[in-house]
Image (cartoon, rainbow, N blue to C red):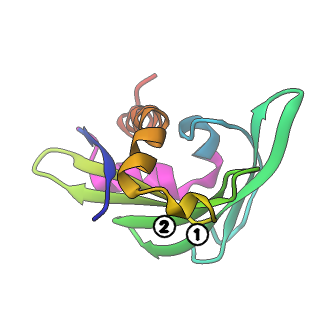
Amino acid sequence: MDTATTRTTTADADAVWNVLADGWNYAMWVVGASRIRAVDATWPDVGSAIHHSVGVWPAVVNDETRVLAVHPGRELRLQAKALPFGTAEIIMRLTPMARGCRIDMIEHAMSFPFTLVPDRLQHVAVFPRNAEALQRLTFLAEGRD
C-alpha cells in the first residue's frame, strides 16, 4: 500500500505538471535542494536527470535526480539520491478534480538497510519535508508568492 503525502490545489493538473516538467523549478519546490547545476535537455523523459546540489554552503553536496518512469500530465517517478543514506523512489501523482487537482507524493527508500524500515515509518520520517514540498509546488502552480 502506498503511503502518500497529499495536497489539493486550485491549479489544474496541467499547471502542476508544467512546474514538474521544468527541471529548473526543482530547487524552488524540493526541500533541501539548494541550486540547479544542469537539467538534461530531454527532462522529464525516462533516464533524464536534474543535476542539483543539496545543503547549505559550505556543506553543499552535488547530487542528481533521475526519471524512472513518466506518464505525461499524470505521474512522474524519480530516483533521488539521499547521500549519505542511499537512494529513494519518489512518485509524484496528479489526479484531476472538478476544480483543481490532488497531488500525491509517495517516497520509498531504495537502499539497504533503509528498505527494511516499514513504509508507514518511512512516511512519518519524510512527511514534514514532503508536506512543505507540496505547499511550495502548489504555490508555483497557482502562481502565488
Q: Which mark is residue 31?
A: none
**Residue identifier under label 1:** 67
> In this rendering, does residue 109 appear at all?
no
Residue 57 occupies which quadrant of the picture? top right
What residue is disc 2 on? 77
Residue type (three-letter) at the residue carrying disc 2: Arg
35 in magenta: no
Q: Secondary structure at mark 2?
A: strand
Residue under the point 52% across and 58% down: 21
Q: Is residue 76 above or below residue 68?
A: above
Q: As rendered, which of 80 and 12 lies closer to the eye?
A: 80
The front one of 19 and 119 is: 119
Q: Which residues are magenta?
A: 10-24
- Front in this rendered view, residue 27 or 32: 32
Badge 1 vs badge 2, beta-carbon distance below 8 Å: yes
Q: Is residue 74 left or right of residue 10?
A: right
Is 83 rendered above or below residue 108?
above
Residue 142 shows in the view: yes
Residue 5, horizontal then vertical, whole percent: 34, 45
